[in-house]
């Protein structure tokens, strides 16, 4: 189905994903290449009203998932979704919702032959589910076999910008908790072992990271 090229950037908050995605976008735009850039974080789309009600009245969550209440929120979600069938049902509903959200952002631009740069993608959604339900490597391996994942175009290149959680916490000023960052890094490291991802040391300076990314992109049959 895909005619274009999909380039994705993943990693914990503060890793530099957005910076690198924008730099590559600018690099390609200056060469008059048809390229679009999207922020691909999984957020409720069609099911947003339902999730608001669940968080407010069932889970009684206060504040963002990434904030100081992360541990409490995680335990609460594990409590209410401890039944495997219920967890899987919610994951499937959320994946379908995410798919519809990305049709105009990812699918259609690819069909038009564009290069699509995505800051966060399906890997980030998997990390959300794994974090919420405290999944280990076996659980993640099982989730990667979910048939609904076939709905999402396979990326041409996925760059995992890796940094220590402590660096991410220093770069963030929005209350993102170190516990959240440590948990997300654990999950991304597990994903890195299961699927084809290019791991890049994000603690290096911006120019060095971009040089590594451009070198990898040059392997694609396209004039980068």
Image (spheres, rainbow, N blue to C red):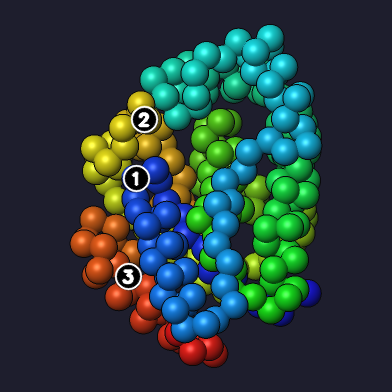
Graded by Cα atoms within 10 Å as few (under 14), some (14 to 19) or many (20 or more), the crowding at tag 1 reads many
Residue 140 in view of the camera = no
Q: In percent of the image, x 43 and y 62: which residue is there?
A: 22
N-terminal label among 2 and 3: 2
Above or below residue 136? Residue 147 is: below
N-terminal label among 1 and 3: 1
| Residue 14 appears left or right of 198 | left
Above or below residue 218? Residue 39 is: above
- Residue 143 on image: x %, y %: 65, 48
Q: Which residue is mark 3?
A: 210
> In what element is the residue under mark 3?
helix
Q: Based on the displayed image, in which of its 4 quarters is residue 34 positioned?
A: bottom right
Q: In percent of the image, x 72 and y 38: which residue is there?
A: 45
Q: Which mark is residue 191?
A: none
Do labels 1 and 2 touch, CB within 8 Å?
A: no
N-terminal label among 1 and 2: 1
Above or below residue 154? Residue 224 is: below
Do labels 2 and 3 touch, CB within 8 Å?
A: no
The span from disc 1 to disc 3 (Cα, nearest Å) is 16 Å
| Residue 99 appears left or right of 8 | right
Q: Which residue is mark 2?
A: 174
Q: Based on the displayed image, in which of its 4 quarters is residue 17 positioned?
A: bottom left
- Residue 84 on image: x %, y %: 71, 31
């Amino acid at each position: 189905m895909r005619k274009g090229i999909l380039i994705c950037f993943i990693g914990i908050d503060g890793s530099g994903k957005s910076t690198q995605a924008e730099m590559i976008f600018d690099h390609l735009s200056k060469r008059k290449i048809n390229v679009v850039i999207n922020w691909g974080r999984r957020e409720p789309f069609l099911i947003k009203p339902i999730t608001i009600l669940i968080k407010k009245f069932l889970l009684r969550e206060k504040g963002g998932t990434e904030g100081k209440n992360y541990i409490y929120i995680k335990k609460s979600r594990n409590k209410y979704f401890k039944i495997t069938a219920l967890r899987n049902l919610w994951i499937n509903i959320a994946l379908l919702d995410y798919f519809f959200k990305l049709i105009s952002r990812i699918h259609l631009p690819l069909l038009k032959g564009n290069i699509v740069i995505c800051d966060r993608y399906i890997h980030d959604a998997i990390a959300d589910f794994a974090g919420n339900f405290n999944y280990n490597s076996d659980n993640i391996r099982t989730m990667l076999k979910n048939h609904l994942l076939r709905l999402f175009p396979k990326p041409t290149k996925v760059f995992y910008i890796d940094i220590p959680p402590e660096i991410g916490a220093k770069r963030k000023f929005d209350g993102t908790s170190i516990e959240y960052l440590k948990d997300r890094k654990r999950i991304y490291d597990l994903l890195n072992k299961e699927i084809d991802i290019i791991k890049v040391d994000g603690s290096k300076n911006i120019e060095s990271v971009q040089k590594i990314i451009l070198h990898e992109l040059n392997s694609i049959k396209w004039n980068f």
